[in-house]
Every structure is written in structure tokens, then in C-alpha cells.
Image (tube, rainbow, N blue to C red):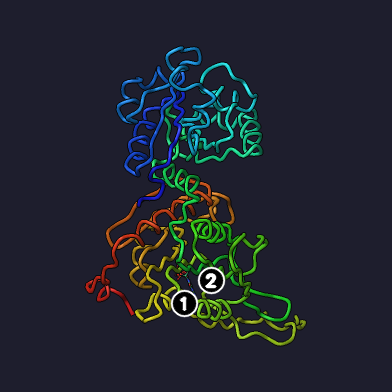
Amino acid sequence: MMAGAGRRVLLVVCGGIAAYKALELARRLREHGIRVHPVLTAAGARFVTPMALQALCGERVSSDLFSLTEESEMGHIALSRSSDLIVVCPATADILARMAAGLADDLATTLLLATDTPVLAAPAMNVRMWEHPATQANIATLRARGVTFVGPENGLMACNESGPGRLAEPEAMIAAILRQLDGEKPLAGRSALVTAGPTHEPVDPVRYLANRSSGTQGYAIAAALAHAGAKVTLVSGPTTLPDPAGVTTIRVETAREMLDACQQALPCDIAICAAAVADWHVAPNSQKIKKAAGSPPPVLHLVPNPDILAGLSQPSPLRPRLVIGFAAETEHVLSHATAKRLRKGCDWIVANDVSPATGIMGGTENEISLIDATGCEHWPRLDKSQVAHKLVARIATCLRAPQTDPDPQEADERLP
Ligand code: CTP
């Protein structure tokens, strides 16, 4: 049985240019066997017709608070409680404000106020409206009351402005809805290994070589995998982040310690190497290196570190079914990342541009291209936690597919 099948969603469609995407969402939900009861606001009806919504949902559209016919078929209180989840899509700045204020001046707001059913909102609006302190305060109020959110995503909007405000992609909305409906655990029974953060390579007892990685993306991936039901081991270099809930976190310092901890975590189904592992270590001095007056500065002799990702990707009985690497690049991102995937032998590589101007390394957002044997897919700039959930949704889909043998030609192309 498909995840979510037989469950019931109340879909509140509000008045924004993204309203037409609610039609696609309804269609996709029904493909999952989910029943969709549509509620259309007056503004929503300026963007999509009740006829179109009804045709795609297969259920009569409710829109009028004072309709005797609708009220006699199912009162708004019953309507608000008849579903397993209420999805507001698109959630405009206006409906979010009215929800936060507790207004009940139309059917949508009345049933949102009268319900104790979980509510998921998919915001979509102009970037300035999204960033306005009033909207952000409303979001904070609603979050504190238990409303969950999917999106918005970054990108170019209908108003020709660019930034956060685009409705989440249908795939992300479906994943969020399934998570809410079934507490869906698409990775239940799977085990995953994630590396994250930088490594510190000691030079002497007080100095080390390091990089700017914060670990945020790797930690978000570990949390998203655990949320999807996987048993997760996170092997982390030094970071200031707290251990993600429900994840076994092993803290290490150097690349060689990270390798040891990863080997201990095998076998597993999924390995994701998000760590920015130092490529070299120094044969460390046991005492602090002193500046001797008049003598030249010390020369550090760098020794290559083991490549953890390449090791995990090697064909072996312990090889995880899906091995995913990251490619941190500052130029020729796609060509370098594509070559890196083949060189390391991993299944997918997540390419990102870590040039300082992007603010990605050490920041809260990421803009990635996902490269596999079939090609490359560019994702819009997203919060790192959204990238993590989207990646985990993709992993779950991949692991549901029957396993295929590795492409022999690709193995031949792998460089030593
Ligand atoms: N990686 C690893 N062990 C290393 C170096 C890198 O596991 N010793 C992994 C990283 O976690 C990442 C991928 O390899 O998943 C690519 O890392 P990146 O730093 O982009 O590339 P490098 O292999 O270090 O190559 P270069 O620095 O030349 O780009």
C-alpha cells in the first residue's frame, strides 16, 4: 500500500498566482491514494476555477461560509475535523496574517480556527512580502502554535523579482504531506552513515590545519534521514552544532579518526560524505613549534590523508547500496564535480560552488546540482534543511526502485 493511501487532506487554495500549482498538488496527492477535499477562498477563485479544482480533486469544492447547501451537507466544524491534515496552498501573506490573528471571516479561516487537525502551510508570495517583519512575525506565531511549513523556495517569481517566495516544488510538498500524514518513514529499516564538518589536522599541540566548513549541511542531512526513519550514524569533525536528535553522533578530530569511525559504522545502506575532509595532515610536532630568533619559518611537510569517500565507494561486500559525495568547488563546478564522481566511484555527487561570494560554506543556504550516472539536475537556492529533506526524498525514491548492477562502462571510466 502506498504511503498516505486512504488518508484525507483538506486543501485550502488561496488567492495567489501560484494557486494553479495547487491543481497539480491535488492530482499528485490523488495518485498517492489520498482523498482531497478542496476549499477555495474568494481570492483563490480569481486564480483557479471551482470546476478545475473539483475535477482534479474529485470532490465538491467548499467555498462559502454561509451556504445553506454546503452547511447542510457538511458543516464547517465537521469539515475542519474530517481530515487527517489541512494543507494551505498557496499560503499567501494575507491568509497567514488572518490565521495568526485568529480571524474567522470566511470559510477557510473559520475552519482553520475551528480545527485541531495538523496544519501544513506552503507559503508563496512576493519576496518583499515574505521578508516583511509582519509576515515573519506571523510565521513565528503560527510555528509556535504548531503549524508546519514547507518552502518557500528561492527563485525567480511571477512578479519578476528573485529571492525567497516561490511555492515549494510539488515533490517537496508531497514529501512534507506524507511525513505529516503517516509520520511516513520511507527509510524505516535502513541504516545510514553521514560525515560532516571540517577535520582538524594538528601541527603541534596548539595549532592545526582546518577549513571553513560549519557542518550545517551534513547535520541537516543526518536529521532528515533520521526523520525519514533511518538509523543514522553521524561522524562529525569539530563543529559548534548540537548533536541532532535521534542520531548516533561520533565526534572526531582528524581525517584518519573520521575514516576509522566510518569503517566502524559499516555495513550500512546509505553513505553520505558531506564532510570537508582535509586533504593532508602534517607529521605533528609533540611540542609547540617555537620561533627561534633569526631562523627561517618552519616548513610544514604535508602527507596525503585517506580519501574516505573513495574508500566507501570501492566495490566490496561492505559497499553501501548508495554512496553520495559532495563536491566543494570554486570554478568549473559541474565539470570538476562530474570528474570527481567518476574518480571517487560514488553513485551521486552533490556539487556546490563554495566561492566566498556564494556564502554557502559556513552559511545557512545551499544551491546544489545533483549529478548521477544519467546527468545533472540543478536545484534552486534553498535552506540547507530543505536541501536535506529534498535529498532524502530522492534517496527514498531511489531505494524503492529495484537494484541494478553498476554500469561496467562507468567502472572502466573510473580513474585509478
Ligand atoms: N572526501 C573524503 N575524504 C577526503 C577528501 C574528500 O571523504 N580525504 C570527500 C568529501 O567528504 C566529499 C568529496 O570527497 O564528499 C569531495 O571532497 P572535495 O573537498 O570537494 O574534493 P577533494 O577530494 O578534496 O578534491 P579537491 O580538493 O581537489 O577538489
Q: Residue at x 51, y 20 (%)?
A: 107
For the residues labelled 1 and 2, say whether their Cβ atoms are less than 8 Å apart. yes
Question: Tag count in the figure?
Answer: 2
Q: How far across and down, in percent of the image, does residue 301 sit?
A: 57, 83
Taking the image as shown, residue 284 lies to the left or right of residue 164, namely right
Taking the image as shown, residue 287 lies to the left or right of residue 400, namely right
Q: Residue furthest right?
A: 293
Judge the density around disc 1: few (<14), some (14-19), many (≥20) Cα neighbours within 10 Å: some
Q: Residue furthest left?
A: 409
Ligand 1 within 8 Å of the CB at mark 1: yes
Taking the image as shown, residue 226 lies to the left or right of residue 27, namely right
Q: How far across and down, in percent of the image, does residue 221 sit?
A: 51, 58
Residue 136: quadrant of the picture? top right
Ligand 1 within 8 Å of the CB at mark 2: yes
Is residue 225 visible in the rendered image? The answer is: yes
Which residue lies under the disc numbered 2? 277
Amino acid type assigned to the residue bearing label 1 in the image: Asp
Q: Residue at x 59, y 27 (%)?
A: 114
Name the foreground residue: 283 vs 275: 275
Q: Is residue 388 above or below residue 23?
A: below
Which residue lies under the disc numbered 1? 307
Dot 1 or dot 2: first in sequence order is 2
Judge the density around disc 2: few (<14), some (14-19), many (≥20) Cα neighbours within 10 Å: many
Residue 289: quadrant of the picture? bottom right
Amino acid type assigned to the residue bearing label 2 in the image: Val
Is residue 358 visible in the rendered image? The answer is: no
